[in-house]
Amino acid sequence: MNASFETLITTYINDKVGIAEDFLSVDLCHNLRNNLLSFNDAHLLLQAGVGNDGKMVFDNLIRNDSIYWLDKKHNNAFEAEFFDTMDEFVAYLNENCFTNIKSYEFHYSLYEAGSFYRSHLDQFEDDTKRQFSMMNYLNADWQPKDGGELLIHHNHHNQSIAPTQGKTVFFKSDELLHEVLQTNERRMSVTGWLKRG
């Protein structure tokens, strides 16, 4: 068992937001970051939208990041390593917390300097399959001046989380409003959702 799995779950139980500083190894972060940058250089990243299926809206006043979906069909060694980690975590989560997670989906996310994502929930009004949100950060040497914090809105306080390399954040998709504050540097992550069905 990866000790960071227990850290993520324990911190989630304590404060509705799980945080593990080393959920992904330094090497895997580096390799996923290189993947993301190579896909960006090849113009494969697409503008991120808001909503699902036919209700997708593209509005740069709400969010202006770019994304590219991970897929096992890519046969990419580093994506496969990431998926192996997620398979292990989902198995551990289901066994210990009876969450009944059946699947997941993840995309690379790139915020160029000046980008942001306004306050939102991660679960769609007409589709409740998303149960947990996970952000896996790929930013080496991130500094406070770089901005780009994940701001989570609790009932009586806000929680600011820096997107530092190796850190993973985990919370219920339908519970916590959150936003990405404007970033002053290129900000990268693998972000996604654990799903029922």
Image (spheres, rainbow, N blue to C red):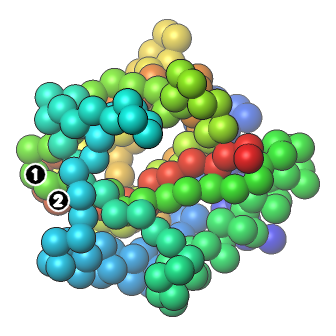
115 sits left or right of 4 in the view: left
Image location (x, y in percent) of residue 89: 72, 62
Quarter where residue 18 is shown: top right
23 sits left or right of 142 in the view: right
Distance from the alpha carbon under mark 2 to that under mark 1: 5 Å
Residue that mark 1 sits on: 113
* Mark 1 closeness class: few <14, some 14–19, many ≥20 residues within 10 Å: some
The quarter of the rendered structure image containing the N terminus is bottom right
Residue found at x 53% / y 22%: 125
Whichever of callouts 2 and 1 sits on the residue coming sooner in the sequence is 1
Residue that mark 2 sits on: 186
Residue found at x 45% / y 54%: 191
Image location (x, y in percent) of residue 104: 63, 56
**Camera-side residue of 13 and 42:** 42
Q: Visible in this render: residue 161?
A: yes
* Residue 171, above or below 100: above
- Please state which amino acid type lies under the numbered disc 2: Arg
Quarter where residue 107 is shown: bottom left
**Camera-side residue of 152 and 130:** 130
Q: Which mark is residue 122?
A: none
Callout 2 secondary element:
loop
Image location (x, y in percent) of residue 181: 24, 35
* Residue 4, above or below 39: above
* Residue 158, above or below 99: above
Q: Number of labelled discs? A: 2
194 sits left or right of 117 in the view: right
Residue found at x 28% / y 47%: 48
- Asked whether the residues under the numbered discs 2 and 1 touch, taking CB atoms below 8 Å apart as contact, a structural biologist would say yes
